[in-house]
Image (tube, rainbow, N blue to C red):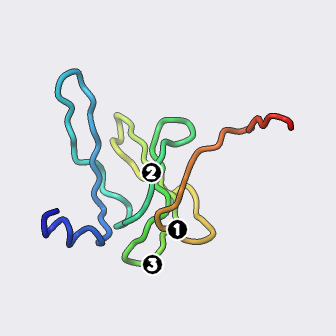
Amino acid sequence: MEKDAARNYLNPLDSTEYLVLRPGPSQWNDGPTLPKHLLGAVCLTSPDGTGILIVGGYNDEEAENKLIYLLQHSRADGFQWSTVAELSGGRVHPVAMLIPDPVDCPAG
């Protein structure tokens, strides 16, 4: 690992990248700036499949991040972040998953 990469590993960042999949060579592009500098956050697809949720993480303002952010894209507005929920307590390196509603559990 390069010295700069090692030094920045524990610093919260606000940059993102996304991969454009194409036939032939795919390409990484700079994405939208995060609402806050974060380290140790997780992302998952939004419940409706049209965006990305960012959950938890450590930020350099208030330690553990309580906010859940949603990233969506439209042709008119481009990428837009919004705050969609707040956790009861901050989380760093959380486990986050979507659970379908209703959940069918087999009897027995």
- Residue lying at 20% horizontally and 36% vertically, measured from the top left: 27
Most foreground residue, 8 or 50: 8
**In the visual, does 101 lie left or right of 55?**
right
How far separated are the C-alphas under marks 1 and 3?
12 Å
Q: Are marks 3 and 2 in contact (CB under 8 Å)?
A: no
**Sequence-earlier tag: 3 or 2:** 2
Secondary structure under the numbered disc 1 in the rendered image = loop
Label 1: how many residues lie within 10 Å, few (<14), some (14-19) or many (20+)? many
**Sequence-earlier tag: 1 or 2:** 2
Q: Amino acid at mark 2?
A: Cys
Which residue bears the numbered disc 3? 62
Q: Amino acid at mark 3?
A: Glu
Secondary structure under the numbered disc 2 in the rendered image = strand
**Sequence-earlier tag: 1 or 3:** 3
Which residue bears the numbered disc 2? 43
Which residue bears the numbered disc 1? 91
